[in-house]
Amino acid sequence: MYGWIIMASLSRTITLQIISNIAALIIIVAIISALLVFYSQTTLQGIVVEMVQDFARQLAKNPTIPPDQRQQLVNMYQQSLMVRFGLVGNPLTKVYHMMINIFTLNLGNSRQSYMAGTTSISSQVIFALKNTVILFLTATLISTLLGLGLGMYAARRPHGIIDSLVSFFAILSSSLPMWWVGMLMLLAFAFNLHWFPTQSLPVYFAIQQLHAQYASGAIGYFTYVFDYIQTWLYYMTLPLITVVLVSIGGWAYIVRNVVIGKMAEDFVMTARAKGVPERRVLFGHVLRAASPPIVTTAVLNIIVSLGGAIITETVFGWPGMGLLFWIAIENSEPMLIAGNVYITVLLFIIAVIILNILYVFLDPRVKTSGGQQIF
């Protein structure tokens, strides 16, 4: 009976969390839509004024047209332009339709193709998201695993040599701007040693050539797979090393602090008093108790990274969300910016929902807390 009550409480809590996060997403999209409608209205009204003035000047050159008729033609032309550019109608209706378009990623086309060989905004955003996932998800997983190992090792011997080195490296790496480290990596390994390319943007041209060779039968399957992996590593190694190098120290320091805090709690002393082996205490008791904040940081880091590091991706020319966002700002593409922001916010909200569910299984206290929301 008690188990059913807990399950009902958890189901209710998870449902409320999902509803509240969906409401937050709707509010954010509504704000983006209102800004886009205001921007487009202001921009298009300026264009209409210029076109009407040009039309009036052209009519003024014809003396056979009476002034009254000329003004009537100008008014008719202005009205037709207002209809053509969608400047008539209820602004709230326009915001509503804009929200629907953003939710469905029906964002139209950009003025030119910036990525993926297409002007479709949704295709470019999805293409950039895939590339950012490949780079930053890989980097985050490597940083998490290495940081977890270093942090656990440092926590076993607090204030020792390894602990001091990990703490120093964490402070040093966290204080270095990622884009600055990236520029040093390019200077050393791309421009001087010529081991890696100076820009990663051509990676897909190389992959397309590889596909063409395999399709024509010029290379076999195993050669294709080997060259495919080699091509990705060739273009991705420098940005990957840069992200890992800057992130790993902070990760190790977070794990170290959390584990040291948990090792001072009563349940660890009790386990040691019972004669439980130190390795089992560390990995079976301490690590499980420390898993909620570690998992939270890992998931949030992954989701935040999916938005792309604008300057870092621009430095390496990596065709991801950060570079696409920069290109959209540089070329005044508001719909491209909206698509980029929407995908990032959507993934973040999904991550928050997943984290709240994971907390139920990682932290037993959540199960008996009356369904309190973590985020």
Image (cartoon, grey):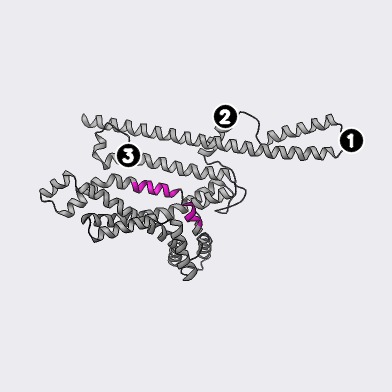
Q: Which residue is mark 1?
A: 64
Q: CA distance from mark 3 to mark 1?
A: 77 Å
Q: Amino acid at mark 1?
A: Thr
Earlier along the polypeptide chain: callout 2 or callout 3?
2
Our reading of the magenta stretch's main secondary structure is helix
Front residue of 224 and 186: 186
Q: Disc 2 versus disc 1: distance between alpha carbons?
A: 44 Å
Q: Residues within 10 Å of mark 1 (few under 14, many from 20)?
A: few
Q: Residue at x 40, y 53 (%)?
A: 137
Say whether residue 67 is left or right of residue 178: right
22 drawn magenta: no
Percent across and percent down for residue 13 are 32, 32
Q: Residue furthest right?
A: 64
Q: Circle 3 — which element?
A: helix
The quarter of the rendered structure image containing the C terminus is: top left
Q: In percent of the image, x 50 and y 38: which residue is there?
A: 103
Is 237 rendered above or below residue 8? below
Residue at left 77%, top 40%?
54
Residue that label 2 marks: 92
Q: Is residue 350 left or right of residue 36?
A: left
Image position, residue 85 (x, y; %): 67, 37
Using the image, determine if residue 315 lies above or below residue 77. below
**Dot 3 or dot 1, earlier in sequence:** 1
Q: Amino acid at mark 2?
A: Leu
Which mark lies nearer to you, 3 or 1? 1
Residue at which label 3 appears: 357
Write down the region rendered in magenta.
Answer: 297-314
Residue 369 sits above or below residue 294 on the image: above
